[in-house]
Image (cartoon, helix red, strand yellow):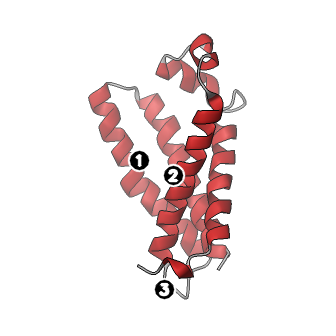
Amino acid sequence: MDVSTINWLAVIAAGIAAWALGALWYSPVLFGKSWQQETGLTEESLKNTSMAKVFGTSAVLMILMALGLAMFFQGDAEMNWKTGMQAGLITGLLFIAPSIGINYLYQRKSLKLWAIDAVYQVLFLALAGAIIGAWR
């Protein structure tokens, strides 16, 4: 695979946008408290975590996922924001959300937690796909 044709700035921007969406998604403004309750994490356990490590590592992983999308798009001269968004949605809906669901079934996690986490993944991949598709 020839990675020289990948728009690395678009990949990084898509990963950062996905991270920013997650910061909002898992904040108290949206689903942070519900997510915390469903995971069983306490305020104290969250305070005793290196948030720089969590945030930094998650940003790197999101950039890797954006890179994966960009690799799927290679050679597609007709790629635009809409087809990029559709590819992200398909990836999220048909690969990521079911994968999370399988893991959560065996871990006995709640449907509510699956919905919070899976919908975020679907949305962030759609956003990343749109950014990569638009920035060609």
User: Which amino acid does the dot numbered 3 rest on?
Assistant: Gly
**At which x and y percent is residue 34?**
57, 24
Location of residue 66 (image quadrant): bottom right
In the rendered image, which residue does mark 2 sit on? 122
- Please, what is the three-letter code of the amino acid marked with disc 1? Ala
The residue positioned 61% from the left and 78% from the top of the image is: 80
Q: Is residue 131 above or below residue 110?
A: below
Residue kind at label 2, given as amino acid type: Val
Measuring from the top left, give residue 18's x and y in whole percent. 62, 51
Q: Quadrant of the C terminus?
A: bottom right
The residue shown at (62%, 38%) is 55
Q: Which residue is mark 3?
A: 75
Q: Tell me the tag on residue 120.
A: none
Label disc, if present, on residue 97 of the rendered structure: 1
Residue neighbourhood size for the residue with mark 1, other residues' Cα within 10 Å, grouped as few (<14), some (14–19), many (≥20): some
Image location (x, y in percent) of residue 10: 65, 68
Cα distance in 3D space between marks 3 and 2: 24 Å
